[in-house]
Image (cartoon, rainbow, N blue to C red):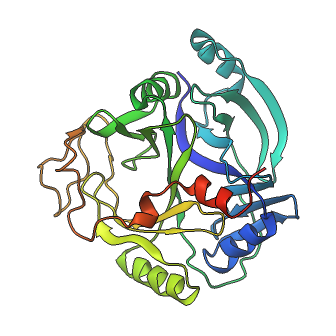
Amino acid sequence: MIPVRRLGYAVYESPDVLRQAEYYEEVMGLVAVERTASRAVMATQMGQEVLVFEKGTSNHCPRLSLEVAGDFDLKDAAKKLAPYNIKTSTRTGVTPGVAHAVVFTDPKGTEIELFSAPKSSDAKPRGGGIAPVKFGHIAFTATTAQSISNFYCNALDFRVSDWIGNVFAFLRCGPDHHTCNFIDGPDGAMHHMAFELKDWAHVLTACDLLAHHRRPIIWGPGRHEVGHNIFIYHRDPDDHIIELFTEIDLMKDESLGYFEPRPWHRDRPQRPKVWGREEAAPQWGLPPSADFRRQGEQHLARQGHNG
């Protein structure tokens, strides 16, 4: 299998690239490594590229990048994916930080760029904004969450952290409880993306900053039961759901098979399992708003941004 170890950047189409870049600099506190009217590459203030916006007619997420283990030769990716009848190609000059990538399309239709040895950005931040620590995870819908989860585990070395019933998978490729979520639904639709904050105080600061910029919180603050992260959710100008979180469960030793013990765990130790829908509800906090539950792309289309 291909040893994926970290989430790289997500690529989004946008009807207004410069508006998105401005939002992610001013409000989210990211750094524009590259910015034109047709493409913007955004990095954290620590220099890791996390988002790419490209001119388009929708708010679709057509591509996702994944970093592989440093000792894996990307030339072997084609051989590893051949049993799944998946063909690969190569791409150069992908972003300022990624010189070379092996590209394939996963079973739900998302194009995946595999890379290694990325170059960190030295672009100077404007200052201010939320300034997340990293791009934490991303969630997609798929016709069957089970099928796409099997592919990610068998082909890309992801591990199952938890399930909610048989429709919502939480997969990890590193110590974080989840790097990718898959939820039963239409193939390839992005459900939400999540950025990690330092601590609860950082979440509070984020709440104040979102209020200052009149970006309503559509769910939270609360603590999830599955993964146990503290969370808030809001929508960006292209209507994507953005989660800001802290205190997510960590699997620090795969051979032990349980998450780092924390006071809010109800199972001791907390091991991967299948959660029932009711027991998977947040430990505390209000239920999600109607705005959280609606379909983002439909809202964007109603605003006249679809082609």
Number of numbered discs overlaid on the protein picture: 0
Residue 267 falls left or right of residue 280: left
- 288 up-or-down from 125: above or below: above
Q: In the image, residue 32 lies at what x, y percent?
A: 76, 68
Query: Would residue 49 be visible to someone looking at this image?
Result: no
Q: Position of residue 165 (x, y in %)?
A: 26, 37
Furthest residue in direction bottom, as rendered: 212
**From where the camera sits, is residue 268 visible?**
yes
Which quarter of the picture shows residue 31? bottom right
Residue at screen point 62% across, 48% down: 8
Of residue 66 and residue 252, the one placed in the foreground of this image is 66
- Which residue is found at the position 17% from the left and 62% from the top? 264
Q: Quadrant of residue 67?
A: top right
- Is 261 above or below relative to 235? above
Foreground pick, 171 / 298: 298
Above or below, 156 relative to 257: above
x, y percent for residue 234? 49, 69
Judged left or right of residue 172, residue 76 is right
User: Left or right: where does residue 273 sit relative to residue 125?
Assistant: left
Residue 205, percent across and down?
A: 46, 84
Q: Is residue 264 above or below residue 76?
A: below
For the point 55% across and 78% down, the residue is: 130
Give the residue displayed 68% in from the left and 64% down from the top. 303
